[in-house]
Image (cartoon, helix red, strand yellow):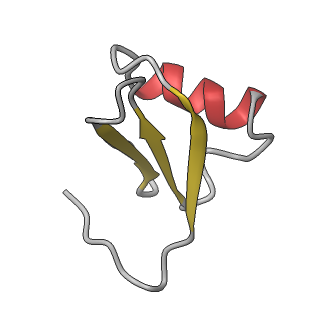
Amino acid sequence: MFTLSTSNRFHLYSQATDMRKSFDGLAGVVQNTLGNNPLNGDVFIFISRRRDKIKLLHWQGISFTL
């Protein structure tokens, strides 16, 4: 678990995301599509096609939190 604060940088991936993706799949989207490093400590926000679900991906130094 992690807390959201103003010290975090947030990045919204505006395209519909397959909510079946887990850590590796979402980290791949961050790296390949957004051109960002998923290990930099920022929070990446993904939204489902119907816009009724979200996933946040955050690296906490030793592992991802989803």
Which sits in the foreground, 41 or 29?
29
Residue 29's image quarter?
A: top right
| Residue appearing at x 35%, y 21% in the figure | 19
Q: Residue 22 location in percent, x, y?
A: 37, 22
Side of 29 relative to 41 (left or right): right
Say if 27 sits above or below 2 in the image: above
Residue 64, position in %: x, y? 39, 43
Please say if 35 is above or below 12.
above
- Specify the farthest residue to the bottom: 6
Quick one: which residue is furthest to the right in this view?
35
Residue 35 vertical placement versus 24 (above, below): below
Q: Position of residue 54 (x, y in %)?
A: 32, 40
- Number of numbered discs present? 0
In this rendering, position of residue 47 left or right of residue 2: right
Q: Residue 42, image x and y in percent?
A: 55, 61
Q: Residue furthest left?
A: 1
